Amino acid sequence: MAATMKANVAVEDVNVTFEDQQRINKFARNTSRMNELKNEIDAKKKSLQNMQDASDDLMMLEDDSILIPYQIGDVFVSHTQEETQEMLEAAKETLEQEVKALDDRVAAILQVLGDLKIQLYAKFGTNINLEADES
């Protein structure tokens, strides 16, 4: 008679302290904030690409005397090709600095998340899942 053995996975009874709950909450808040920052970075990179495309299109204009409408707030103001190009370059530079600042914030959050993962996995092991769903 062949007997089959089933491996029972016992879930350890781990006591969750107030400090543990605070760490879990901090992890969740930082993960949410990081996702928001990544979405903001993606939007700014798309705007940056649009500005680069506009800049490239301006360079292909043959007539330098054409006034180019440039949006400032809700108003379009016409400028020469050179002025518009300078304004686009300044706007791109500002946007690149904003993206870099956001990237730095994401890196700082990733460091915090890494530290929290170490602490939480050390206590809870496989009883806690801190990995983001890829769905």
Image (tube, rainbow, N blue to C red):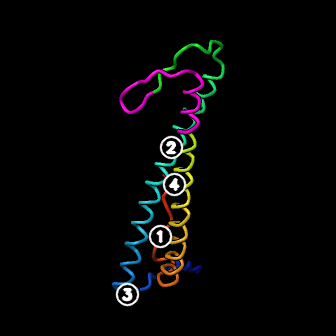
* Image marks 2 and 4: residues in contact by CB distance under 8 Å: no
Name the residue tied to disc 4.
134
Name the residue tied to disc 3.
15
Residue 103, percent across and down? 55, 56
> Could you tell which of marks 3 and 1 lies nearer the N-terminus?
3
The picture quadrant where one finds residue 81 is: top right
> Could you tell which of marks 1 and 4 lies nearer the N-terminus?
1
Mark number, residue 97: none
In this picture, is 60 found above or below 13? above
Question: Label 4, label 3: how many angstroms apart (C-alpha)?
Answer: 29 Å
Residue 44, percent across and down? 50, 43
Question: Label 3, label 1: how many angstroms apart (C-alpha)?
Answer: 16 Å
Mark number, residue 129: 1
The magenta stretch spans residue 132: no
Residue at position x 51%, y 79% from top? 121
Q: Along the horizontal axis of the image, is 135 left or right of 63?
A: left
Closest to the camera, between mark 2 and mark 4, is 2
* Element type where label 4 sits in the image: loop
* Element type where label 3 sits in the image: loop
Name the residue tied to disc 2.
44
Question: Label 2, label 3: how many angstroms apart (C-alpha)?
Answer: 44 Å
